Image: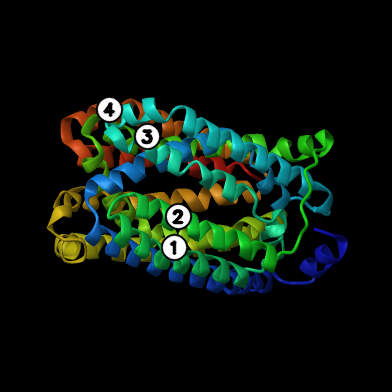
Amino acid sequence: MNAADASDHSAETPQELGGAVLKTFFTGLSWTTAARGLSSIGAALRYVVFARLLKPFDFGVIASATLIFAAINAATDPRIGSALVQQEDEIDPYLDTLFTTSVVRGLIIGLILVVFSRPLGAFFHLGDAYTVFWAIAALPILQSIQSPRLISLYRRLDFHFMTILNVSEVVASLIFGLMAVLYWRDWRGIVFSMFMGGAVRVVLTYWLFPHWPRLGFSMARAKTMLSFGLWASFSALCDFISKQLDNLVVGHLLGPSALGNYQIAFRAGEMPVAEFTTAASVVTFPMVARLRRDRHARARLFWSVNAVVAVVGLAYVAFIFAFGAKTVLRLFGPAWVDAVTPLKVLCIYGLLQGFLVIGRTFLYGLGKPERTAIMSAARAGVLAIVIYPFTAWHGPTGAAAAGVLSILVSLPIMGYLLQQTD
């Protein structure tokens, strides 16, 4: 925050400043919600169409591959892009280092997926479908070459561009994926869908955020970004474990068909709240970074966002308990009946996770990534203890219950950490 900004804020009353903060927040939120909402509708339509044409086994194969891809991605992500969002300096000198790091990491992830495809396929009981790991090896490489200047979207709060990116990606994924699924009639169609959606997004990043990237690396600039990014990276890794360990255990213990059902239930259970909190966190992160010195404005923003999360989440929980079984059977068909029971637990999971995501975003915005790491590590630890016995005893529903328990332990920790930020 510069001196002019500080003087402007000092001339405003807390009520006026709080109102301005909320106005800015809801303006940004309207764009990010539109982006997430439209992409969610497209994603939901894609799920319904593909689920009608494919089997739970095919979704389980894709879930196994994307789970490993996401695990390696989380374990190797230095989160240096996040450091640039909250940084007050000019970011252009850092972009080549950011791009080079991303490309090298994408190549390494792709190589790992190819080299370990057979043992990974055996772990998930995929049989000949282990080649799915070969198929998705190009995805991390594709994602790594997007325009590094995309990070300026979050710094300038230009969230209307997000609508263009998200909608274009989902539309391309749906159109090309439908053709591919009709042609192959198995999981390969979904892989092609993901690849085409990602390719369209990469092209658009260069159109909307022009930049001619070069392969170059500055150790000094990397260290500057890593001072924030390493804590954020550790927190993200713990967060990944706490979100995906259940999928790993379900896939290993129960096989790809059970994992396919669980994935549908998981996505349907968390979708409304997850989409809102994702949109809200994109806006709140840079806003909280600007409001580090104004506790009153931050508190008003925090409780306003969580109130919306509560309304959206509780309404969806009520809907699922009343109409969840009929909705699943009507949208996806009788082959997905095993998704109904875990869905009821996972919609509660989605609500609780929404509160956790908002709290984590505030800690990031305040420049306290080490505190998010504490919260995420506690959640991952609880899940690691209970997930295997819960899943062995009660199947996918037990896995969902283990996830809920891990969040219930983390919420009071988050509250305490937020109280200690001033």
- On screen, 113 above or below 150? above
Q: What's the amino acid at mark 3?
A: Leu
Q: How many residues crowd around disc 3 within 10 Å: few (fewer than 14), some, or many (20 or more)?
A: many
Residue at mark 4: 388
Ranked by sequence position, the earlier of labels 3 and 2 is 2
For the residues bearing labels 1 and 2, Cβ distance under 8 angstroms: yes
Residue 418 image point, x, y percent: 56, 45
Which is more toward the observer, 271 or 214?
A: 214
In terms of secondary structure, where does tag 1 sit?
A: helix
Residue at mark 2: 194
Ranked by sequence position, the earlier of labels 4 and 2 is 2
The quarter of the image holding the C terminus is: top right
Residue at mark 1: 173
Q: How many residues crowd around disc 4 within 10 Å: few (fewer than 14), some, or many (20 or more)?
A: many
Residue at mark 3: 245
- On screen, 417 above or below 149? above
The quarter of the image holding the N terminus is: bottom right
Q: What's the amino acid at mark 2?
A: Met
CA gap, disc 4 and disc 1: 34 Å
Residue 388 lies in what quarter of the image? top left
